[in-house]
Image: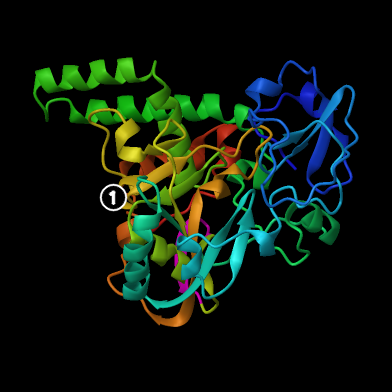
Amino acid sequence: MNFIGVPSQTKNQLKPYKLKNFFKIDKDHGGLPGLNIRPYINELSPYAQMPTSLESFENEVIFDGCYGQAYSYDLPLSGAIYGKSDCIPNEEIDKLSNYGYLRVPFRKIPRIRVASTQEIRDILNIAISYIPKHRLMFRGQNSEYCIDRDERTKIALFGDENTLEPSLPPSASRMGVAIDEIIPPWQYAIQLFWHSHLTKLYGKISAGQFSRYQKFFDEWLQTYQFQYFGMALAQHYGLPTSGLDVTSRLETAIYFARNTLKGKDGILTAQSNKNEAVLYVLAPKEDMYVQAFDAVKTVGFPLIRPDKQDAYFMHQGWGFANNQTVNRIVLAFYLDPDGDYIDLPTTDELFPSPNEDPFYSFLLNIQRNSPVPLKSYLENLYGVV
């Protein structure tokens, strides 16, 4: 398991534990508060089945590397600490299920088979009254992936060896990449692009507007928005990051679920998915870990790929909580491959060509001419040409 943003010295202190994807570490380790460990130690579901007597650790804690849940005692193998699946009562939204449930800590997620865009919208209109007032986000995938846990661990966590636990780790974690090596040259590349873009605008816009663009950009570089913008930009052009891309537009997510995208020699092709795809509905909190792409970019930056995809960037799967993003999933739709999904965007609309996307054109030039290290991370760069 690759923990993003965790120093090597801390990783070297981790010890294996009897449950899969759990680790032990010294409880006095100074880095724990800043490594995405949950603030509440020993958090249990009211539907757990814990014994009355537990053996506490003297100087260590264990944690689930998927969610950052930490415990100061040895976990019983039959405790179902996240809630025994068949004991958790159905909330109103859970009654929408026609295909069982996914499991995450302390709750379940309804799985719903659907066969049309309209059916999805009808269910969303019902579900919205049961969801806290968060803006809904969507993520479509042509396949569903689940955390690889053994039966013993599934019983210890959920009381069910057949548990389906969704897996949404960030791309850097999946690829085993240290993003600290990528960020500095990537941010420098963004600045190079901006100055090149602004130079091309000289004489085409007023002197006042030109100065305004430059002033905003200089101030923007000093804000956290530039950091999130850089990550979101990297995610949408194939570089590994500490987050995931989601969209506010249902049809865009359905497109990604319904199509298998393949890049060869930088050229993108989309093939219709013949298998049952999944569309996750997420209800993220409005905080700094979920950002709209157009809300974090500087004034004057051109319209590019993330704009076309109505993109948001979720930055949660870092530190000792590799899979934390799944805690925001509220519904999971499973799309009949022969269903009726209307008004979907085209590949050309979602992936503008270099002539329409100046940043993509800029990256293609870097891919051909850039020195290491950035060039090696652009191997997965793809798009419509």
Residue 237 seen? no
Residue that appears at 35% across and 39% down: 293
Judging from the image, what secondary structure is the residue with disc 1 in? loop
**Towards the viewer: 43 or 329:** 43
Q: Relative to 219, is 327 on the left or the right? A: right
Q: Which residue is mark 1?
A: 355
Q: Is residue 198 above or below residue 116?
A: above
**Residue found farthest to the front:** 52
Image position, residue 275 (x, y; %): 55, 77
* Magenta region, main secondary structure: strand
Quadrant where the image shows the C terminus = bottom left
State the extent of the magenta-drawn residues as a range.
264-273
The quarter of the picture where residue 6 lies is top right
**Towards the viewer: 285 or 359:** 285
Question: Callout 1: 10 Å neighbours few (<14), some, many (20+)?
Answer: few
The quarter of the picture where residue 211 lies is top left
Q: Tell me how many marks there are.
A: 1
Image position, residue 59 (x, y; %): 88, 22
**Residue 266 sits inside the magenta stretch:** yes
Q: Is residue 327 above or below residue 249?
A: above
Image position, residue 243 (x, y; %): 53, 41
Residue that appears at 32% across and 70% down: 122
Residue that appears at 54% across and 62% down: 90
Q: Is residue 222 above or below residue 93?
A: above
Q: Which color scheme does this rendered protein use?
A: rainbow
**Towards the viewer: 104 or 144:** 104
Image position, residue 133 (x, y; %): 35, 45
Quadrant where the image shows the N terminus = top right
Q: Amino acid at mark 1?
A: Asn
**Residue 271 sits inside the magenta stretch:** yes
Q: Is residue 232 above or below residue 109?
A: above
**Towards the viewer: 309 or 51:** 51
